[in-house]
Amino acid sequence: MTKLTGKHVFAITASAFAVIIGVNGVLAFQAVSTFPGLEVKNSYVASQGFNDRKAAQEALGWSLAPRYADGRIDLAFTDRDGQPVTVESLEVLIGRTTSTAQDARPEFMQAGDVYTAPLELDRGKWMVKVTARTADGTLFEQRSEIFVQG
């Protein structure tokens, strides 16, 4: 049986700290490389018109209900009376909240009262960021979440 010496204790301690520092380094690199952390290019400029955009969107009285099933995502826009509305332009970003690797911008087509697009999503939580405009140019923005069951 070998005797535990100061050199052994130092080696054990140094090895433990090396593992901790190495794992933290890998995790920090992964966090920075997979999520850009950027919502807008200039938050000050974006904030200047926020209240006006919010008031205009609230005046529309629209609500949005995203649904996902069988490889299709549907967006149903309704007014305050629950009646379907037509959007002039529509941009949608679908992705994970923690990574941009699986981001998708599907092309939606109007099918009756809903806008629909084919899209295969893995199971889990997905963010749906919708930017739509009315015929008069009023902006409607909403971020929703959908949960895809396995």
Image: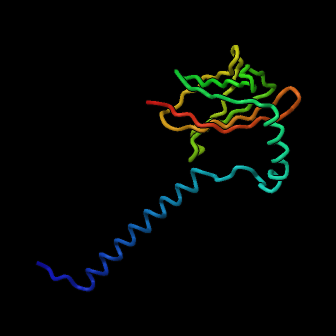
Left/right of residue 88 with respect to residue 7 in the rendered view: right
Left/right of residue 73 with respect to residue 11 in the rendered view: right
The one of 19 and 148 positioned closer to us in this rendering: 148
The one of 33 and 122 positioned closer to us in this rendering: 122
Instruction: Residue 53 in the image: state x and y as whole percent.
Output: 82, 42
- The residue lying furthest to the bottom in this view is 6
Instruction: Residue 123 in the image: state x and y as whole percent.
Output: 48, 33
Rendered view: 146 above or below 6: above
Rendered view: 137 above or below 49: above
Report the quarter where the C terminus lies. top left
Asked where in the image residue 77 lies, by quadrant, the reply is top right
Please give the name of the residue rendered at 57% of the width and 39% of the height, measured from the top-left corner: 102
Asked where in the image residue 76 lies, by quadrant, the reply is top right
- The residue lying furthest to the right in this view is 136
The one of 38 and 29 positioned closer to us in this rendering: 38
Please give the name of the residue rendered at 74% of the width and 50% of the height, measured from the top-left corner: 40
Instruction: Residue 135 in the image: state x and y as whole percent.
Output: 86, 26
Please give the name of the residue rendered at 65% of the width and 21% of the height, measured from the top-left corner: 116
Instruction: Residue 48 in the image: state x and y as whole percent.
Output: 84, 52
Left/right of residue 48 with respect to residue 111 in the rendered view: right
- The residue lying furthest to the left in this view is 1
Report the quarter where the N terminus lies. bottom left
